[in-house]
Amino acid sequence: MLKPLIEIFLFPIYTILVLMFMILTVLALPLKIPFVERHVRQHINKSTDKLRKKKS
């Protein structure tokens, strides 16, 4: 008797959590991509500088 009531009560909470997670990821992606790109570029520049110094 109680189990269906709990499921009906929890279902909207789960859907809200999933929707919030989806919205957060969608909002976070455009913010994270430039940050990651910058981080990767800095890392690549450091490693290429090391390679250039070894060659010269």
Image (spheres, rainbow, N blue to C red):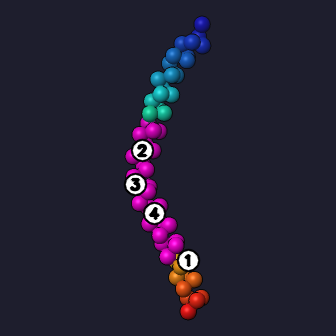
At horizontal 44% and vertical 55% (from top left) the residue drawn is 32
Find disc 2 in the rendering and name its residue. 26
Dot placed on the residue nearer the N-terminal end, 3 or 1: 3
From which residue to which does the magenta span run? 20-45
SS at mark 2?
A: helix
Q: Are marks 2 and 4 in contact (CB under 8 Å)?
A: no
Task: First in sequence, mark 4 or 3: give its number.
Answer: 3
Residue at mark 4 to residue at mark 3: CA–CA distance: 11 Å
Q: Nearer the viewer, mark 4 or mark 3?
A: 4
Q: Earlier in the sequence, mark 2 or mark 3?
A: 2
The majority secondary structure of the magenta stretch comes to helix
Between the residue at mark 2 and the residue at mark 1, the CA separation in whole angstroms equals 32 Å
Task: Say which residue label 4 marks.
Answer: 37
- Of helix, strand and loop, which one carries label 3? helix
Separation of disc 1 and disc 4 at Cα? 15 Å
Q: Position of residue 50 (x, y in %)?
A: 56, 83
Q: Tell which circle, 2 or 4, labels the residue nearer the N-terminal end.
A: 2
Q: Amino acid at mark 2?
A: Val
Residue 52 in the figure: left or right of residue 20: right
Residue 47's disc is 1
Label 3 near label 2: C-beta < 8 Å? no
Viewer-closest of 2 and 44: 44
Residue drawn at point x = 41 percent, y = 60 percent: 34
Q: Residue at x 44, y 57 (%)?
A: 33
The residue pinned by badge 3 equals 31
Query: What's the distance in space between the residues labelled 2 and 4, CA to CA?
Result: 17 Å
Secondary element at tag 1: helix
> Dot 2: few (<14), some (14–19), or many (≥20) neighbours within 10 Å?
few
